[in-house]
Image: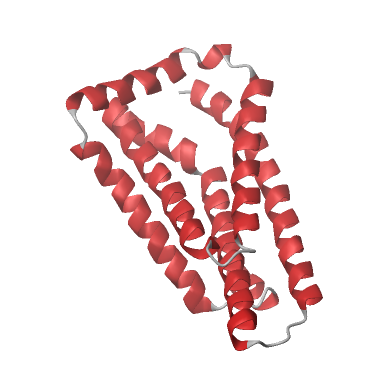
Amino acid sequence: MNLFDKMRKKLKINKNGILFLLGIAAIGFISGVIFITIISKSDQTLVKEYINDYFNNINKINYLDVFKNTFLESLSFIIIVWLLGMSVIGIPINVFYYFIKSFIIGFSISSFILTYKIKGCLYAFLYIVPHNIINLIIYTILIYFTINFSLTLIYAIFKKKNINFKIIMNKYVNILFLSLGLILITSIYETFVVPNLIKLF
């Protein structure tokens, strides 16, 4: 039994629900990769200029500002998604947010390759592994539990069933804190490690 299966059983995660979300992530990722090829030449030029500016100014990075922006962006995403999970309308919105996150990863990879060709593959790898992969896993688990929480509320409302809200809410809060803790770690890695790895090349 691998680590994912152990975690899935401990958290009581339904395999089909995870596969559904991974399917959404795959569609988002592929869409992001393809999107760079269908935008106009002027937009592609803007993307190249943005990436070149990042690399040209990589030695001038204010690490604390970058860390603050990176962490606050992820923090905001997690809290908004978590809160939406406690509403009936949260399911489609959270699935859309999840799609966008995977779309951005695909778009970023194709942008690096468009700008730096073969060398762009290396930059894309440094940009993705491991922090963005870990982030995507965090988002997958978080979105899964928000959907599950929303469905539980819908079931209780329309079927007029009593549920042990305390137990469900405790698990839901634990998922929030787990997500925040891991995001803090990946934000530190993205801010302080990735730029220095890129400088080596």
Instruction: List x then y, in percent, for residue 166.
Output: 81, 74
In the rendered view, tell whether residue 141 sits above or below residue 6. above
Instruction: List x then y, in percent, for residue 120.
Output: 34, 31
Side of 10 where 100 appears, left or right: left
Instruction: List x then y, in percent, for residue 137.
Output: 55, 57
Front residue of 15/201: it is 15
Kindly identify the residue that appears in the image at 57 percent across and 49 percent down: 135
Kindly identify the residue that appears in the image at 60 percent across and 58 percent down: 84
Asked if residue 120 shows in the view, the reply is: yes
Quadrant hosting residue 176: bottom right
In the rendered view, tell whether residue 132 sits above or below residue 174. above
Front residue of 31/131: it is 31
In the rendered view, tell whether residue 27 sits above or below residue 62. below
Asked if residue 13 shows in the view, the reply is: no
Instruction: List x then y, in percent, for residue 65.
Output: 65, 22
Front residue of 174/63: it is 174
Instruction: Indicate the quadrant containing the N terminus: top left, top right, bottom left or bottom right.
Output: bottom right
Kindly identify the residue that appears in the image at 51 percent across and 44 percent down: 129
Kindly identify the residue that appears in the image at 76 percent across and 69 percent down: 169
